[in-house]
Amino acid sequence: EVQLVESGGGLVQPGGSLRLSCAASGFTFSSYWMSWVRQAPGKGLEWVANIKQDGSEKYYVDSVKGRFTISRDNAKNSLYLQMNSLRAEDTAVYYCAREFGSWYAQYFQHWGQGTLVTVSS
Amino acid sequence: AIWMTQSPSLLSASTGDRVTISCRMSQGISSYLAWYQQKPGKAPELLIYAASTLQSGVPSRFSGSGSGTDFTLTISCLQSEDFATYYCQQYYSFPRTFGQGTKVEIK
């Protein structure tokens, strides 16, 4: 059974940093693209970033470019999101998602339960 | 970025109804469209990919259609467990984008 378990969320002040983790199990982690998707309270879904199987390619939504960094450790079956220069508008539940599809056409096949990040003074 | 217009934003329906949700793209995306269901406090779940292919385990009352710029999610006979919020999502290009969501509520 595919399992994705996020951790690392919490309360952080504006301008601060946080590192999210996603522990994957039940599948061959190194064979899949992985993504982070977020959802602000009471709002819709927003894709944040994704990373290729070997970490050689990464893509970001414009609003986080230069502030967030996605990475992975295939030996540890783990996905990460380093978030710097956090803003109030980054407040959201952050979901880790396993992608599936062909080449670069990948949808979100499995999701974790999410971790809440609150940016507030 | 590809903009998506999902409608309606709120849909009031009764158990047994047939409901349709629309998703329109700002440019053509072939069939690179997925639909997700999200219940309160839960993560989204994949319902349909490639515009019309049902994810394993999803009931057959769900169906998807369309290609290019116009897509539709249909629930043929609404069940109590289907009251939720539904999102379309394109995976044709970066950034990946979602529709604004359609909340299906009990009439």
Image (cartoon, rainbow, N blue to C red):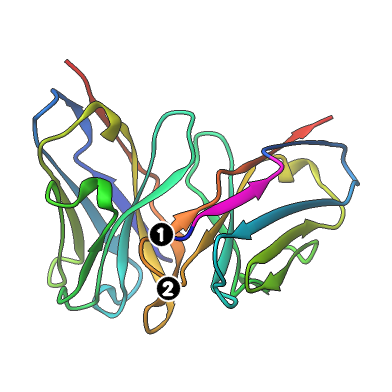
Q: In which quarter of the image is residue B4?
A: bottom right
Dominant SS in magenta: strand
Q: What residue type is labelled 1?
A: Ala
Task: Give me the residue at 15% from left, 77% from top.
Answer: A56
Residue interval drawn in magenta: B3-8
Residue plotted at (64% across, 58% down): B24
Residue bearing mark 1: B1
Q: Name the residue under label 2.
A: A106
Say if A85 sits above or below B65 in the image. above
Q: Along the line of sight, which residue is nearer the eye, A48 or A7?
A: A48
Tell me where residue B105 appears, x and y as whole percent.
74, 33
Determine crowd level at label 1: few under 14, some 14-19, many 20+ residues with C-alpha closer than 10 A.
few
The answer to which of B49 and B3 lies nearer the viewer is B3
> Which residue is at the front of the view, B90 or A29?
B90
Q: Which quadrant of the rendered structure holds the N terminus of chain A?
A: bottom left
Mark 2 lies on a secondary structure that is strand
Please state the horizontal and vertical placement of residue B98, each as a whole percent of the image. Answer: 50, 53
* Image coords of residue A91 (percent x, y): 29, 31
Choose top left, top right, bottom left or bottom right for residue A23: bottom left
Q: Does the magenta stretch include residue B5?
A: yes
